[in-house]
Image (cartoon, rainbow, N blue to C red):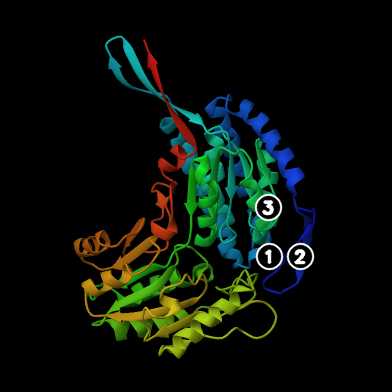
Amino acid sequence: MANNILDIFNPATGLKIKEIPCDDESSIQIKFYKLQEGQKFWKTMVLSERIKIIQNFSNLLAKNIEQLALILTSEVGKPLQESRNEVNGAIKKISFFIKESEKILKATEVNVDGTTHEILIYDPLGVVVNISAWNFPYLVGVNIFIPALICGNAVLYKPSEFSSLTGLEIERLMFEAGVPKNVFNAVIGKGEIGEFLLNLKINGIYFTGSYGTGKKIAEKLKSKMLPMILELGGKDPLYVTDKVDDLTQVAEAVAEGCFYNNGQSCCAVERVYVHEKVYDAFLEVFVLATQKLTVGDPLNLKNTQGPITRPVHLKFLQQQVDDAINLGAKLLCGGKQIEGKGAFYPPTILINVNHSMSVMKDETFGPVRGIMKVKNDEDAIKFMNDTEYGLSAAVYCKDKERARSILDSVNSGTSYINCCDRVSAYLPWSGRNHSGFGSSLSHLGLYAFTQPRGLHLR
């Protein structure tokens, strides 16, 4: 693996922002050895001291938010306010881990058997690898490297090649906060760098990305029996029942769930099913809500939609639209790349869709959505479950018991009633089927970076 240069492009302009050096096998191996040594010290540090350093990191995120947001927008293309929202969201998650970790990780006496005290202890894993994602590098990243560090692990962190500048900013602020340079290290490069990380004698692997890559990681590491979290893709369904209080409000919420961050999110609403009794009325207000979205320069605060982060993905979006139309779908808005500089694609709505079409089966990861009419709850459940994924599912219904009954029949790691496309640090984030396995966030997201030890003390 020869040392080379990674070119960073602005997807809004197509222009090169910067050239940064990539890691190679030699530099990664050196970093890994240093992390192995550094972790020996880091794990002995009092938990409260590690927490104090992580709080410093959180404070630095807040202090530098404008610079961090500008860098994030420049390389991934999301509107500047969304970049600010992301950094603030990361700060909020870090607050959860700081607040909860001491009570969750403390050694606990669970039983006394005569003269023997039985104590549950949580030890760190060692050196863990975090291969992260470009769509929410702060929000996705802090799910992993923050609890990993708090629990006493060292972290070898690979940001996506599409958010490498942000990854380097995260590393810089970690060091400024007081994390030793042999406890957290970023590695820069494309997919082959990630593959090489899997050859190291690591103690855990935490990946966020596509099902295809996640499957390869699981297959390659199966004989090592490593702790692993794979946060993969989704084809997340949403069902609007015939019993909602305010259809306009629902339509606006669904449009945000579909098109926030250009739909480049694993938990974005990707399939919309609407009860036939409200279908026409919903469609009217949903199209209006979608047409209010404005596409353009992400530095212009009036724009709600920036460019597609990976220009190569534009071809796939067009293929999904063309496939649907060829199979009988009707295009209501959008449907063609916007001409001019930058990788811009408008919010797109297709109706008369069915499950023979790619747009209703394959993860879109962009602003193209199919809206499908259903006769009743049974039909909705059938279609919602007709997927290889199982990340999240949503139902809008003022009868919460009915909504709960529907979602209890849908196989997904997260359920939403009268909301969608949200993540809370207090609840586990986990997928089923091709959406992955393992849980980040919540108390489970701390235990994921530990190995329990039972102590029998007589």
- Determine which quarter of the picture holds residue 135: bottom right
Badge 2 marks a residue whose secondary structure is strand
Residue 246, image x, y percentages: 29, 74
**Pointer 1 and pointer 2: residues touching (CB < 8 Å)?**
yes
Q: Please name whichever residue, 291 or 406, is drawn nearer the observer in this view of the structure.
A: 406
> In 3D space, how far apart are the residues under numbered discs 1 and 2 (Cα atoms)?
8 Å
Q: Is residue 9 visible?
A: yes
Rendered image: mark on residue 74: 1
Examine the rendered structure and indicate whether residue 328 appears above or below residue 275: below
Q: Residue at x 29, y 16 (%)?
A: 112
Residue tagged 2:
17
Q: In the rendered structure, are the residues bearing label 2 and label 3 in contact, judged by CB atoms less than 8 Å apart?
A: no
What is the CA distance from the residue labelled 3 to the residue labelled 1?
A: 23 Å
Return the residue nearer the eye: 417 or 364. 364
Q: Position of residue 363 (x, y in %)?
A: 47, 70
What SS does tag 1 mark? helix
Describe residue 133's horizontal placement relative to residue 434 as left or right.
Answer: right
Residue 130 vertical placement versus 303 (above, below): above
**Residue at figure coordinates x 50%, y 56% from the top left:** 215
Task: Determine which residue is flagged by label 3.
Answer: 193
Q: Amino acid at mark 3?
A: Ile
Q: Amino acid at mark 2?
A: Ile
Q: In the image, which is nearer the foreground, mark 3 or mark 1?
A: 3
Question: Which numbered mark, 2 or 3, is in the foreground of this view?
Answer: 3
